Amino acid sequence: MRVAIGQLWQETNTLNPVPTTRADFEEFGICRGHDLVEKMEDVNELGGFIQSMRAWPKVPEIVGLVRLPAWPSGTATRECFRWLHEEFFGSIEVAGPADAYLLALHGAMVAEQHPDVEGAILEELRDRVGPGVPIVVTLDLHTNITNEMVRAADVLVTYHSMPHIDISETGQRGAEVLRRMLFDGATPTAAFCKIPAVVPAENSNTEAEAGIAPDLKRRVVELERRPNVLAAGMAPVQPWMDIPQLGSSVLVTTDNDPQAAREACASIAEEFWRRRREYLPELVEAKGAVRLAHEEGGLTVLSDAADATTSGAPGDSVWILAEMLKYDWSREALVTVVAPDVVEQCSRVAPGAEVTVRLGGVRDNRFGTTVEVKAAMERCFDARFKMTGHIGKNMPIDMGRSVVLRHESNVRVVVTTRSGPHFAPEFFRSAGFEPFEASVVVAKSPCGFRAVYSEHAAAIYSVKAPGCAPSDFWNYEFKTIPYPLWPWDDIEKWSPAQDLILT
Ligand SMILES: [Zn+2]
């Protein structure tokens, strides 16, 4: 038996003017064929697939297709999509016939010619392999599940956790679903409900002690323990995509039990809808948040959600930095900026030399601002590390040549060539800092940073500042989303029965 595995991973933010290109995938790290199976055996979903299948009573031949990953960013170019398509289907031809396909997709990728990249890829794969070959797909919690995806794949398995600390486990859950199809004769029967609501990410912490996110996670996890359920997922979509099928989803796939699928799906969708306002966060203006951080003795984390690089924002916002430069900080205050030209400029001078740089407003030329900073060039380093925690298990990251600038206020600006996890402790450590001992960490992340910072931070503020991933996205103009959609529109009545389909 041959099971083919592969990955296409990119989350698109269509508000970000920086396009996603082929170079972004190539720089992040593509693996093909057997190399994929070797290198990814303990990394993210692919690692989960491989380890789970190696423990099956009858171990299949694991055939590596291709791993195509790129960091979250703007819309993929036409050329990029064409190339991805060629890479993906080329790998399927090279691999030869397979008895099943197990794919790790993100599920919220947009290209210039395709608002639903994963739907397009899965539909074509289904056409090519025919109806009898199982296709099981894992997806991020922030996936925008579409009718095309549901129709083309046999089962879609989503992460349960935000922060995404269950990536490898999701891979294992996907493989287990496939095992049940191949060896136990499981027949996937799903109920899918698209909810006309999109929610901010701040209050989506499923690991919190109480709230809507942990409550809904508990429900889907409980469902999956039932013998007649193959997979259950609650997917509050990532909001920054101006596309026709934008919306949150519930998907429950049973082993041939349409009634159970329908009841569970409708009940979870109803709860999400009824409690949707609980997702609305409390935000603090940058000015006030920085002042509060300065008054605090311990570590303050300022969540710059609008410039969250994990949400596909450009990562060069300096709205919070501009406020921080007005104070003196007793311990290091850490801020990050993506600015390849500044890295280039600073790597030409010796450590300790004074530089004057202009930061911000280049990548995000829509909502960004610029500050001029006079600072000492403290050091150059390569932002290269392995990341475990939110969105990764042993995931190799390379944000390129980077520099640390030391301002007289004790603000340290860590400037990188490429975007990446601008919140991860491993990132700050690669820059020579212990983030938990800083006075301030600006985390370009709306919620995922909580996985590690919650227990170390004396205070956490969700900051309201301009950017490409605003928490109040409904105050921005979206042209193609399926209105009426909450919170853009105040929808009075909705029930799951209106939008629930069985497959
Ligand atoms: Zn996500």
Image: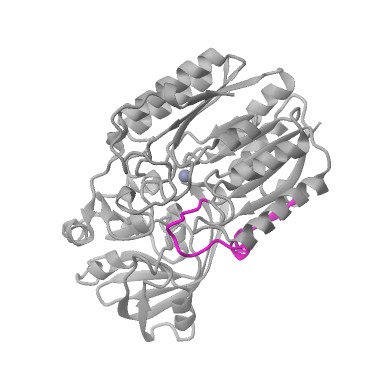
Residue 404 horizontal/vertical position (percent): 41, 73
Q: Is residue 443 visible?
A: no
Give the residue displayed 50% in from the left and 41% down from the top.
Answer: 143
Q: Which residues are magenta?
A: 11-32
Q: Quadrant of residue 374?
A: bottom left
Position of 209 relative to 363 (above/below):
above
Q: Is residue 18 magenta?
A: yes
Give the residue displayed 24% in from the left and 67% down from the top.
Answer: 324
Position of 147 relative to 404 (above/below):
above
Q: Quadrant of residue 323?
A: bottom left
Given residues 416 and 438, the one toward you in this image is 416
**Left or right of residue 32, residue 211 in this image:** left
Q: In the rendered view of the protein, which quadrant contains the C terminus?
A: top right
**Left or right of residue 461, residue 483 in this image:** right
Q: Quadrant of residue 127?
A: top right
Q: In the rendered view of the protein, which quadrant contains the N terminus?
A: top right
Q: Is residue 288 magenta?
A: no
Position of 224 relative to 243 (above/below):
above
Given residues 62 and 480, the one toward you in this image is 480
Q: Is residue 495 visible?
A: yes
Residue 216 horizontal/vertical position (percent): 39, 28
Given residues 210 and 382, the one toward you in this image is 210
Q: How many marks?
A: 0
Give the residue displayed 41% in from the left and 52% down from the top.
Answer: 479
Q: How is the image coloured?
A: one colour
Residue 290 horizontal/vertical position (percent): 21, 61
Residue 484 horizontal/vertical position (percent): 36, 39
